[in-house]
Amino acid sequence: MQKKPIIELRDVWKTYRMEQTEVNALRGVSFAINEDEFVSIQGPSGSGKSTLMHLVGCLDLPTKGQVLLDGHDISKLKESALATIRGKRIGFVFQAFNLIPTLTAMENVMLPMIFNNVSRWQREKTAAELLDDMGLKDRMHHKPNQMSGGEQQRVAIARALSNDPEVILADEPTGNLDSNTGKHIMDLIMHLSTVHKKTIIMVTHDPYIASFAKKKIVIVDGEVGHDHEYLKRILWKNGTHHGGKK
């Protein structure tokens, strides 16, 4: 049975006005992401990948084009409607964890459920189960400054799952972690994809982290590009091309 697209972009442009100048962060981007897919969005700094994530995550609207979620165009929705979609259907995992420092791990995970009017009993039960699944049963009542970076990111993943969203958006999820901890976080994200059947969209500049995904979307200069274009950018940035030094 062919899977249907859960997210689709059709000729999407995003233009920012800076004084008298217009900057096209995205230029005619089109692609589809199917249910249960694990997709990486890869590209160099300034390529437009973060802008793209904001559009896919209903954090911003395109200047032109359509962004479809389950076939429904969200590009003309008001902020209140976008906030509802974000709260119920999309979970976010950020490079900087973005945990609230004054709250415990349990309270951080419970927080998104408050906005969906989940009862306190159910919030506590769900948060405890998710943190247990993340291997944090003994850390539930610790605050972020009492946890390692890897533990904080696992709390952030549990928080992203708290409202059982269909889509997980991960923005450089291992960017602030050492390589061993980063590998463990990627194993957890793979588990969400293969076992829990979540649609994973991961933004990264790291080719190794991108290799965990089953499908890659490369953004170069605001357009969908190809791996060789991204590789060429990296080689020039590092001072190498045609097999030698500049």
Image: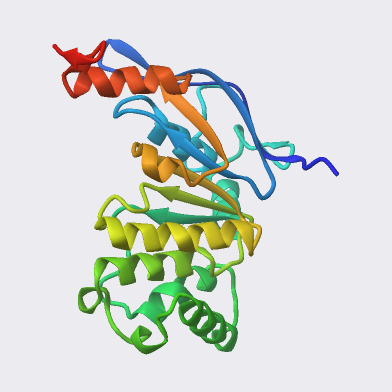
- How many marks the image carries: the answer is 0
Which residue ends up furthest to the front in the rendered image?
A: 243
Quadrant of the rendered structure where residue 77 is? top right
How far across and down, in percent of the image, does residue 14 sit?
A: 46, 23
Q: Nearer the viewer, residue 104 or 195?
A: 195
Tell me: 10 left or right of 62: right
How far across and down, in percent of the image, does residue 210 sit?
A: 44, 41
Quadrant of the rendered structure where residue 28 is? top right
How far across and down, in percent of the image, does residue 3 sit?
A: 77, 42
Q: Nearer the viewer, residue 171 or 90?
A: 171
- Residue 94 to residue 223: above or below: below
Q: Nearer the viewer, residue 50 or 227?
A: 227
Q: Which residue is found at the position 49% from the left and 49% from the top?
A: 169
- Residue 14 to residue 196: above or below: above
Q: Which residue is found at the position 37% from the left and 22% from the top?
A: 230
Tell me: 128 left or right of 73: left
Q: Is residue 202 visible?
A: yes
Q: For the N terminus, which image quadrant?
A: top right
- Residue 182 to residue 216: above or below: below
Tell me: 133 left or right of 104: right
Tell me: 98 left or right of 239: right
Q: Nearer the viewer, residue 236 or 98?
A: 236
Q: Which residue is found at the position 34% from the left and 36% from the top?
A: 205
